[in-house]
Amino acid sequence: MTVNPTQDRLTIAILALGGQGGGVLADWIQEVARAEGWVAQGTSVPGVAQRTGSTVYYVELARSDGSGRLPVMAQMPMPGDVDVVVASELMETGRALLRGFSTVQRTTLIGSTHRIYAIGEKKAMGDGRGNGDKIVEAAHARSKRFIGFDMDAATERSGSVISAIMFGALAGSGALPFPTETFRKAIEHSGIAVTSNLKGFAEGFDQAQAPVAMPVEEVHAVPVPTTDRGRALASRIAASLPEAAHVHALHGVAKLMDYQDGDYAALYLDRLETVAARDAAPFVLTAETARHLALWMGYEDTIRVADLKTRGSRVARVRGEVKAQDDQILSITEFMHPRLQEVCETLPAALGRRILASKGLTNLLGRFFTEGRHVETTGLRWFLALRLVARMRGLRRRSLRYIEEQGRIEEWLELVRTETARDREAALELVKCQRLIKGYGDTFERGLRNYQRIVARHRSAPRDAATIRSLCALALADDKSAALDFALAS
């Protein structure tokens, strides 16, 4: 054991997200200590659940001196005075480090290396993800011992819950002077999901003995065509595009066949080949165009959203995430707020334009789309309604949104092709400007407006690659476009 057998006081901080069972873990630890004759106290400092914050559970243990007197214990962990820190996710490990709970002279730090992205990371206009490698490096540097592994993956393997994984890792770490069997008995005495919790405990115990595993970025496998049309398009990619663009192009074809059909994927390759014809080794421009063109052609409209929300694969994924049993009924409620403009964009172009151009019609119809609504997509009524919208995919080419997007895409590609002859690096940054255009509703409109402003400025007086890249970064800096406004004005 790593703990000093003569130590009379132990302090433990648990950082967990809402719903991860941090309170259960704290209760188990106290039961273990009391079973071994120690005095135990548990408190919690609540945060905002579900990833905008976490709850810090604090457990303090004291060896009984046999006098019957109770020691005075703290209500919350203090920096520099924590023996063990257990964190359920990588950013929670980082929070423990920032708050000074872990110290190199004293603390055993047990943390998961998997990520659950914070609200701040998700709402960033660009890539707002924190750097996981730096947290792992800091965990080694600022703890006496760091035990790290993917607790989410361990939970899936064991079919258990993450609190059981953490409990097993704590036992396996040897940071507490209690027998392993006492830990197991605490789970048995709870009488709740004993079998699965014991499996999770065993998984966490074993992982605590293994070397620290670095966080691994998710790698998507290259799509393998399963239809004759898909195989034909894959062969075309191999024959007509440089190797540097093959992976992105294969993903693009798979995405657009799923989004629309084989003809739409063929149009994607038609467009991509015109860029490749003007590119040169190492064909970075073609590879980036393959990625961004697929994203733009697969824009999100009401048809796409309805399709994704009602797919059987999505229901299966949600069942897996909430660990619903086969005999349990799953209900999924979505919050949807389609605006009149998005509805009109789904209509045939002439009809959609007519409604949007008429003040009377927009006032009359717009009142039905002023507020969002909760939609139970697993209920028959809303499921059938959304499937009906999803079936409009065959009519998408006649829709107002389709016609508008194809025009924008062609203008963008023509600008890239023209710019390639003048400055290939600038052309590459113009390709990457597509990342401004994403989502739907206000997010889409803001991104499109920023993209159009940058392109308009470039058309009026061509900018170099560094300037275009800087303007794009400013557009992604905030959701009000204040930084970009200032840069363009000056």
Image (spheres, rainbow, N blue to C red):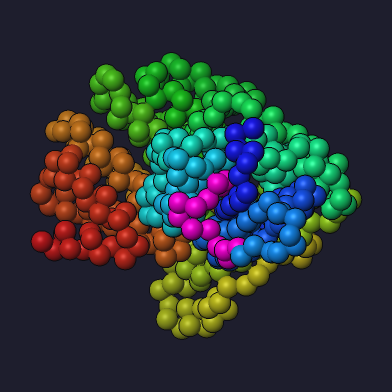
Q: Main secondary structure of the magenta part?
A: loop
Q: Which quadrant of the figure has residue 279?
A: top left
- Residue furthest to the front in view is 67
Residue 81 belongs to magenta span: yes
Across and down, in percent, residue 84 comes to: 57, 46
The structure residue drawn at horizontal position 66% and vertical position 54%, both measured from the top left corner, is 62
Residue 365: x percent and y percent?
A: 54, 79
Q: Quadrant of the N terminus?
A: top right
Q: Is residue 140 above or below residue 315?
A: above
Determine whether, in the image, residue 474 is placed left or right of residue 461: right
Decide whether residue 266 is among the magenta residues. no
Identify the residue shown where x is 47% and y is 68%: 341
Between 410 and 115, the one lying in front of the other is 115
Give the camera-side residue of 117 and 481: 117
Between residues 199 and 363, which one lies in front from this camera angle?
Answer: 199
What stretch of residues is rendered in magenta?
Answer: 73-92
In this image, 338 relative to 285: left or right?
A: right
Look at 41% across and 59% down and name the residue there: 444
Measuring from the top left, give residue 421's x and y in whole percent.
17, 30
